[in-house]
Amino acid sequence: MPRHRLFPCWPSCCLLLFCTLGAWGRPEPPSANPEHVHLSYQGEPGTMTVTWTTWVPTRSEVQFGRQPSGPLLLRAQGTPTIFVDGGVLRRKFYMHRVTLRGLQPGAQYVYRCGSPQGWSRRFRFRALKKGTKWSPRLAVFGDLGADNPKAFPRLRQDTQQGLYDAVLHVGDFAYNMDQDNGRVGDRFMQLIEPVAASLPYMTCPGNHEQRYNFSNYKARFSMPGNSEGLWYSWDIGPAHIISFSTEVYFFLHYGRHLVERQFRWLENDLQKANKNRAARPWIITMGHRPMYCSNLDLDDCTRHESKVRKGLWGKMYGLEDLFYKHGVDLQLWAHEHSYERLWPIYNYQVYNGSKELPYTHPRGPVHIITGSAGCEERLTPFTILPRPWSAVRVKEYGYTRLHLLNGTHVHIQQISDDQDGKIVDDIWVVRPLHGRMKYL
């Protein structure tokens, strides 16, 4: 006999049971213990922001200090905010954000976060150095999932060895943070904690964050500025880094005005960055969906008049002309689950510095697509023949190392996790200190 005849109320009973029980069929006890601890940098020297989650309302406090053991004598406090997931269960949790101030540049700190109701374990981080005369090392990648996070163990090992000063995660987290009423996001935040609680974990939104108006993304990460992390900029060493949202071009039901607002903000920010270019010569952008790619799919970057490149309807708020006009040096992308390095390019034309040294004094921006950190959607294949503007293509799990050596030299390496950490791409980008605003 069909189940619904034996138990007429079965569907509603199951829904009630599903709403009451956790992912493993047992109640979720409310906890005051901090989870999902991660760091971010708000752009103010001598600061670091600590963000974490609890399941009940508690105080927001960070205890920190310079000594590796013993009491943590410094204190900083914040105010928690309530976040309600948009799923059917309307799961509620509390986001805690506390900014530490007065940090000594380059010094190592030990900290724990929470309240007397529950404390995290102790973590360590190194405060970012001050000024422009140092050489930051960044880990760069996108498209990292809670399932199949292939490159993450190696990233974690790199972090433990002190190889990086910050992380740039170029969109797409967890796949997706909203799934299973936000529990997939919980698993992802727990996954990245060994890296994100030790380094500033700087992000931009991808297409997998768009559910409920990007609410899970905006709640879980604490990025600079007042646009809830959809776009912002910050300085590190000799570079000015701009994070923006490509998604405003694709989800217009949130309002076309967002495209215009971001575009005007980008114009203004690039103008300011160029005025300060003597101090910080490198301008680097990070956005999720690339303008160009040679992957075998139907994504926007395979279209000649891509929305990101040419704008809405091929004529409004396109980014390629804007970035070229302001002399952006390096453009970091993800979305395609592979690695691809382009020759210096503008409007489909290759502008190498020279035949022998294409990235020395390039006459166009350099594009790097690094979306192969690992997720449930696996790797993306390439077209059989590379495009004339495609320099290197790697269909392997991995991530990118970016070393901002000084104002004229940047070192880029692609690490293959499939080949046990082998460097499968290695280039230097060299640009003169003067005349950086325009490509000649």
Image (cartoon, rainbow, N blue to C red):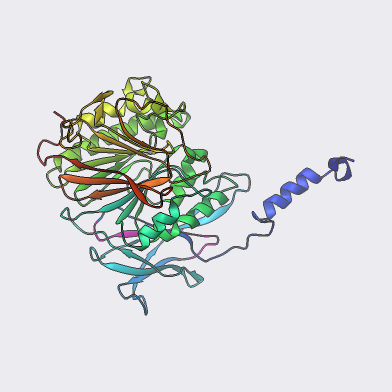
Residue visible at 38% across and 19% down in the picture: 313
Can you name the residue that lies furthest to the bottom here? 70
Q: Quadrant of the C terminus?
A: top left
Q: Residue at x 48, y 29 (%)?
A: 253
Q: Which x, y percent locates residue 142?
A: 41, 43
Q: Foreground: 179 or 224? A: 179
Residue 171 visible in image: yes
At x 36%, y 78%, the residue is 69
Q: Is residue 56 left or right of residue 69?
A: right
Q: Quadrant of residue 312?
A: top left
- Residue 98 in view: no
Q: Residue 220 at x, y = what percent?
A: 45, 51
Whether residue 223 sits left or right of residue 16 in the image: it is left
The magenta segment is 45-58
Q: State yes or no: residue 315 in magenta.
A: no
Q: Residue furthest left?
A: 434
Q: As rendered, which of 428 and 301 lies closer to the eye?
A: 428
Which quadrant does the N terminus fall into?
top right
* Residue 265 found in image quarter: top left
Relative to 195, does residue 434 appear above or below in the rendering? above
Task: Give me the residue at 28% from left, 32% from top.
Answer: 264
Q: Quick check: 267 above or below 412? A: above
From the viewer's perspective, tell me whether residue 19 is left or right of residue 71.
right
Q: From this view, report whether residue 76 is shown above or below residue 414.
A: below
Q: How many marks?
A: 0
